[in-house]
Amino acid sequence: MSKRIDIKNLDIYYGKFHAVKNVSMAIPARAVTAFIGSSGCGKSTVLRTLNRMHEVIPGAYCTGEVNLDGTNLYGKGVDAVAVRRMVGMVFQRPNPFPTMSIKENVLAGMKLNSKRISASRQDEIVEKALSGANLWNEVKDRLDKPGSGLSGGQQQRLCIARAIAVEPDVLLMDEPCSALDPISTLAIEDLIHELKEKFTVVIVTHNMQQAQRVSDQTAFFNLKAVGEPGELIEVGETEQIFTSPEHEDTERYITGQFG
Amino acid sequence: MSTSVEPRDPQATPEGEASQPTSVGRGGELVFSTISTVSGLSILAILAAVAFFLVLLAAPALTSDPADLPYGEFWQWVAPFAFGTVWAAVLALLMAVPVAIGIALFISHYAPRKLANGLGYIVDLLAAVPSVVFGLWGINALAPAVMPVYGWLNKAFGWFPPFAGGVSGTGRTMLTAAIVLAVMVLPIITALCREVFLQTPKLHEEASLALGATRWEMIKQAVFPFGMPGIISAAMLGLGRALGETMAVAMVLSPSDQISFELLTPNGPNTIAANIALNFPEAFGLGINQLIASGLVLFVITLAVNMAARAIIASRAEFSGAN
């Protein structure tokens, strides 16, 4: 299931605005890759191109290649809907469907993929996904209650359960802890460690300690000036990036001298 | 400059009480809270006044001997009209709601922005057409045009009771009246649905798309559940208008006084509102009371429909997008 991603010469635009310039990097399978950088540097934009969510915004497009185990996601005849079923996503703010119960939320993706699932198979999937998101024990007695009644951290883990229920190859996380308290953040970080056993995980974070704690590889994005496109400055082993970065900007950023 | 050094000293300002923090802005606060409270209460007062008027003037018709009533025994007389009112309005909603949701979705989620804006204006414009114009259109344009369709419906689907019976020779049947009503309630339902659909949180739409939903699946998963209370409210507003619509029905429908589900025959009963409009000019004495009593029945039907709608929305409150 877990697949690697190779990004080649990726340029991303919002209409006429050139948002991100010429990104090329490899994201290994069964590992956590963190995107760090100051606000507006394009790290979330790059993340959203990995499952073609970028193009949901009117006028947004990109050029270059994003290869998932060799298959270009932007190749001719590739369906964005099919891509999103292979590359799951967790957002900045927890967004369970408010009108659905916890169980229905977990099954939401499954119901899109295959119309009929037997009741026993449904229960299996729900338990597996919720266990995978470390949420099963907390919610097993109230699966029919609305998902929006959970705490913020639980909601975010419910969203992770919903994303992994469809067994994607890659899991993208766009600042998944920025709306959560420290305890919930810790729970999500522990979960990320477990998730990389099965999935390729890419996480955008503003929290450098978090990047150090959870990731194996770190990519640093920056932009020269406001209005200029964001660029990938440096990518490497997390330990190396945080102890001996090659680039001066990276050093200044991780030591808190700007950004 | 010396006064600004000690702003906390009440004596430093010309008027001592103006600097008391508790009294700042209270005057405006009082005015606005009074205005809003009075406005809120006035709606109750108006409703009570209408109800009081209806009950007062309907009472003689409800209490007097049926033999004295010019149109015959009250409940027997009003039943077909009450049925006709609800039947026409329900038919109109059945036709209008799906189309309205379709237009609203097209405007909010499918059409390019420029086209969407233009289309929105056109829909709003439709709401500004007076009902008498819709009535004329119903008689002169719609009724002749639908005649062949009615004939075909009757031939092909005559086994289905609403399409059974002898087709009307004028086209001025219950179905024609319901179509006119549907066109009339379309703008308000569309406008409200469009507003609700536009308010679907981006978060929920993206959650659905990121799971691999197509646009239509996203709409089913995120837009409709979020908008359901709004759709119901919009439909109820439309239903309210359809129940009370007078002129268009009075002009289009060639009515009978029997309860019949037949849509294509001249057996369709009139609606309460249209019946009042048609008979009021010649009514006198107890006849006026009897017509007003039928208005009271319409009032009660409308209230009941709206309360039912509220109950439906409230029963799903736990799962609404509000929390």
Image (cartoon, coloured by chain):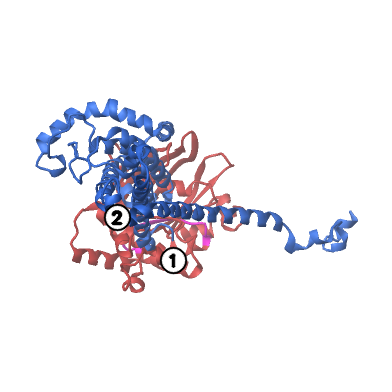
Left or right, A242 with reference to A110 = right
Q: Image point 23% across, 43% down: which residue?
A: B257
Q: Nearer the viewer, mark 1 or mark 2?
A: 2
Q: Which residue is mark 1?
A: A153
Specify the quadrant of the image occupied by residue B17.
Answer: bottom right
Q: On what subunit does the disc labeled 2 rest?
A: B
Check disc 2: other Cα within 10 Å, few if <14, some if 14-19, many if 20+.
few
Q: Secondary structure at mark 1?
A: helix
Q: Amino acid at mark 2?
A: Asp
- Give the magenta part as a residue range: A195-208
Residue A190's place in the image compared with A223, above or below, is below
Q: Which residue is mark 2?
A: B65
> Do the dots labelled 1 and 2 sit on one chain?
no
Image x and y of residue B100, in percent: 33, 40
Q: Is residue A204 or residue B291 the one in the foreground?
A: B291
**Residue A71 shows in the view:** no
Q: Secondary structure at mark 2?
A: loop
Q: CA distance from mark 1 to mark 2?
A: 71 Å
Q: Is residue A200 magenta?
A: yes
Q: Image point 46% across, 38% down: which residue?
A: A14
Q: Which chain is blue?
A: B
Q: Is residue A169 or residue B306 the one in the foreground?
A: B306
Q: Image point 25% across, 64% down: which residue?
A: A125
Q: Which mark is residue B114?
A: none
Quarter the C terminus of chain B occupies: bottom left
Q: Is residue B22 or residue B4 the one in the foreground?
A: B22
Q: Which chain is red?
A: A
